[in-house]
């Protein structure tokens, strides 16, 4: 594997019946990189991430993570290798406390690689980082929308990922709340975690990302830094039409 490459997606295709959702998509994410994945609705972003995380199997191509061929691995084994994902619609264990919601992924995923760690202490450290320490012993059912988004990120972090996939963590939030989530993601990245951000909020993607890949109709149409992407005619056409 090329030095510094954490995730290597090679020619991945995915079909649903006669519909080809992904057509030979390739991309790489480096260790510790802030990576944006964008595209109009129906472009294949979620399908690609499902293939990377193991929620879906790809029909063609290869996916490598940290030197391992994970193309056929089930999702839970990919999580234990260091891939974590947050979802747009948080689904915490509502009958448990905020702290307990973090201890479960910490016990399951992180301790496969870091046996003997103090689960509760680690969970509290994550809650301090994201600003939920005061709610540690509160039931998850009572959290606000922004707090639920923070908890979703915290649950992903409890697995001690090397790669965090943030899937529309800011959808439906106010401008100030978007800035809160963005600050959390930047702080997590400073800890050395590579992050793939999937977002429709362009100002957040452009501010966060060091490099961006654009999908349209299941194919990669552009790659580059934020300024390159903003000035790319193919990207403008994908979003705005002719």
Image (cartoon, grey):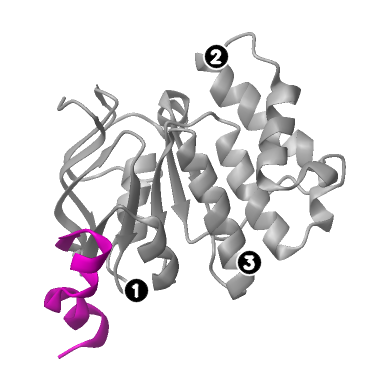
Q: Earlier in the sequence, mark 3 or mark 1?
A: 1
Residue at image coords 75%, 46%: 132
Real-space Cα distance between discs 1 and 2?
39 Å
Q: Which residues are magenta?
A: 221-242
Q: Is residue 99 magenta?
A: no
Image position of 47 with respect to 201: above or below:
above
* Quadrant housing the C terminus: bottom left
Q: Is residue 238 magenta?
A: yes
Query: Does residue 91 show up?
Result: no
Where does residue 229 sit, x and y in percent of width and height? 21, 68
Local crowd size for mark 3, using a 10 Å CA cut-off: few (<14), some (14–19), many (≥20): some
Q: Which residue position is annotated with label 1?
A: 41
SS category of the residue bearing label 1: loop
Where does residue 232 sit, x and y in percent of width and height? 15, 73
Q: Which residue position is annotated with label 2?
A: 114
Residue at image coords 65%, 14%: 117
Where does residue 62 sit, x and y in percent of width and height? 18, 36
Furthest residue in direction bottom, as rendered = 242
In depth, the one of 72 and 234 nearer the eye is 234
> Taking 199 as reference, is 117 left or right?
right
SS category of the residue bearing label 3: helix
Select label 3 or label 1 by which is in front.
3
Query: Does residue 77 show up?
Result: yes
């Amino acid at each position: 594997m090329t030095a510094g490459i954490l995730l290597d997606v090679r020619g991945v295709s995915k079909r649903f019946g006669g519909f080809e959702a992904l057509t030979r998509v390739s991309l790489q994410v480096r260790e510790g990189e802030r990576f944006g994945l964008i595209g109009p609705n129906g472009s294949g972003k979620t399908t690609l991430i499902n293939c990377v995380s193991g929620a879906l199997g790809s029909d063609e191509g290869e996916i490598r993570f940290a030197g391992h061929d994970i193309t056929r691995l089930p999702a839970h084994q990919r999580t234990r290798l260091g891939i974590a994902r947050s979802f747009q619609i948080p689904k915490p264990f509502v009958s448990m406390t905020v702290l307990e919601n973090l201890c479960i992924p910490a016990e399951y995923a992180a301790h496969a690689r870091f046996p003997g760690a103090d689960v509760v202490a680690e969970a509290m450290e994550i809650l301090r980082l994201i600003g939920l320490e005061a709610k540690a012993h509160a039931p998850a059912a009572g959290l606000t929308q922004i707090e639920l988004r923070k908890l979703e990120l915290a649950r992903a972090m409890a697995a001690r990922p090397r790669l965090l996939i943030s899937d529309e963590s800011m959808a439906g939030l106010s401008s100030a709340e978007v800035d809160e989530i963005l600050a959390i993601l930047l702080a997590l990245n400073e800890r050395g975690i590579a992050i793939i951000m999937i977002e429709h909020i362009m100002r957040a993607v452009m501010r966060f990302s060091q490099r961006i890949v654009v999908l349209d109709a299941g194919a990669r149409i552009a790659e580059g830094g934020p300024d390159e992407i903003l000035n790319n005619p193919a990207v403008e056409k994908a979003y705005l039409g002719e």
